[in-house]
Image (tube, rainbow, N blue to C red):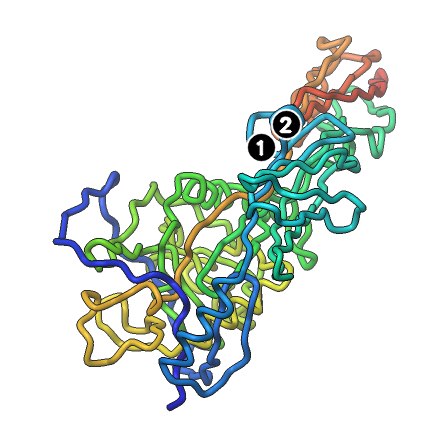
Amino acid sequence: MLHWLRRFAPRVSRSAYSARVSKRPPRACPGVEPLEDRWVPAVNLIRCDLVNLLPMVVDDASLDRVEDLVCSRMPTVSVSLAAASDTGTAGDLRTNLATVDLVGQTGAGFRVRLLGTAITTTADAQGRFTLSGVSLMPGINDLIVRVTDDGGNIGQTGLSVTRNSAPTVQAAPQDVTVMENAENTVLNLADVFRDVDVRNSIVRLQTSGGLIDIELFDQNGPASAPTRTTPLTVANFLRYVTDGDYRDTIFHRLVPNFVLQGGGFRFDEDTHTLPAIPTDPPVQNEPGISNVRGTVAMAKLGGDPNSATSQFFFNLGDNSANLDNQNGGFTVFGQVIGDGMQVVDRLASIPTQNRGGVFTEIPLIDFPRTAAFPADLERENLALVESATVRHLRDVLTFTVSNTNPTLVQATVSGNTLTLDYQENQSGTAIITLRATDREGAFVETSFRVTVQDAG
């Protein structure tokens, strides 16, 4: 019999139902209008950490043997920046040092190597290890640590460490000369200063199908619209991530070749229920980035463009013709990077069932249609977000301005914008000095001259 191979996750015993109280009032469940009913053949897959096995015909005994053979042999490893090397906020993986130490935990006696370098070590009897003398380039450094056990089995993990660098001046403003009572002059300070630490934030979803990294559009947009960002939506999404609200949530809606939607419901292993996650106030719509394949967008209520809360979806195909304009346009706030779309496609190949309510298109794995829903659900039946973490949080530059002659011109900064407001019937000169400061307090300054000529 061709099985839809179950993922290797421990089954848990059921306990009596216990009511849970939401920390926020419940909201109606947002949805995305489907384009049409489509179907994609399922792919049979075994996944256990870093191992993927191709489709096969098996029985339950074979599954047990594969589980014993593969999953029990996979070494695990965790790693972080040593406390003495973490000169930023504790745990933020930021440092002012050019050379740092990494510390981690794995199996006793496992061999440890930092890929791309000659740095190796062996874990002690408690599985602890230190990788010393790791050189960092200015800006963001993506590091991969690999461990090998006595049997030659390999496990690995990655982390991004930022070596802080002071901002620099990439295009100093030219001196400005205007006539009396001229219109305001406006400068975009993002074009004046540069910081190699500044990069879009990245969130990592550990799903039941594998890792998905999402680049968020808080600093720059996609290649098709690099100047368009979605700061409000990104901040909203990051709140749910940092609050832990997406842990053990499910992908509850799948329309093949259209969308894979989640972020709304959590699997409660104790009660075998799917309660809605608590939501924050809705976020203002920020449309403008196209809903093409590989992008991530917010779901919302029909007829209400500004109703998005926690639910998001992956665009499985080019949905721009439909979703870019429907209901005020669906806000795309990120894109899948690396090989994450392979994982998304894997999840999108799971067959769906109609279980009523908001679960009319829920992906379910090896779950009999006669089984009670959700009472008979186990973890291995669901497409899960097991955890969501911030892999990289963008640096932020703040801008200030000083002015030697405010009676001639008022210089103000709002966000990334400098405005020069020339005072009525005034002429003369002023020196405007701009300062850009990063999160660690490092800064750079540049100045330019403003000349207002007498119109008489």
Residue 347 shown left or right of residue 52 in the figure: left
Question: Please, what is the three-letter code of the amino acid marked with disc 2?
Answer: Asp
**Residue at x 66%, y 23% (from the top left corner):** 440
Tell me whether the residue at label 2 lies in contact with that at label 1, contact meaning CB atoms closer than 8 angstroms: yes
Q: Position of residue 284 (x, y in %)?
A: 43, 45
Q: What whole-number distance in Å separates the C-alpha atoms at marks 2 and 1?
A: 8 Å
Other-residue count near label 2 (Cα within 10 Å), few / some / many at <14 / 14–19 / ≥20: many
Does 387 sit above or below residue 325?
above
Residue 293 seen in this snapshot: no
Q: Position of residue 411 (x, y in %)?
A: 69, 19
**Numbered disc in front, either 2 or 1:** 2
Q: Is residue 122 left or right of residue 310?
A: right
- Tell me if 124 is positioned left or right of 2 in this view: right
As drawn, the label of residue 92 is: 1
Helix, strand or loop at disc 2? loop
* Left-right relation of 451 to 54: right
Residue visible at 67% across and 42% down? 199
Query: Residue 5: in sight, yes or no?
Result: yes
Residue 401 location in percent, x, y? Answer: 71, 18
Q: How many marks?
A: 2
Instruction: For the C terminus, give its image quadrant.
Output: top right
Q: Label 2 belongs to which residue?
A: 86
Instruction: Please name the residue shown 56% across and 67% down the image.
Output: 51
Q: Specify the amino acid type for callout 1.
A: Asp
Q: Is residue 405 above or below residue 420?
A: above
> Which type of secondary structure does the marked residue at label 1 adopt?
loop
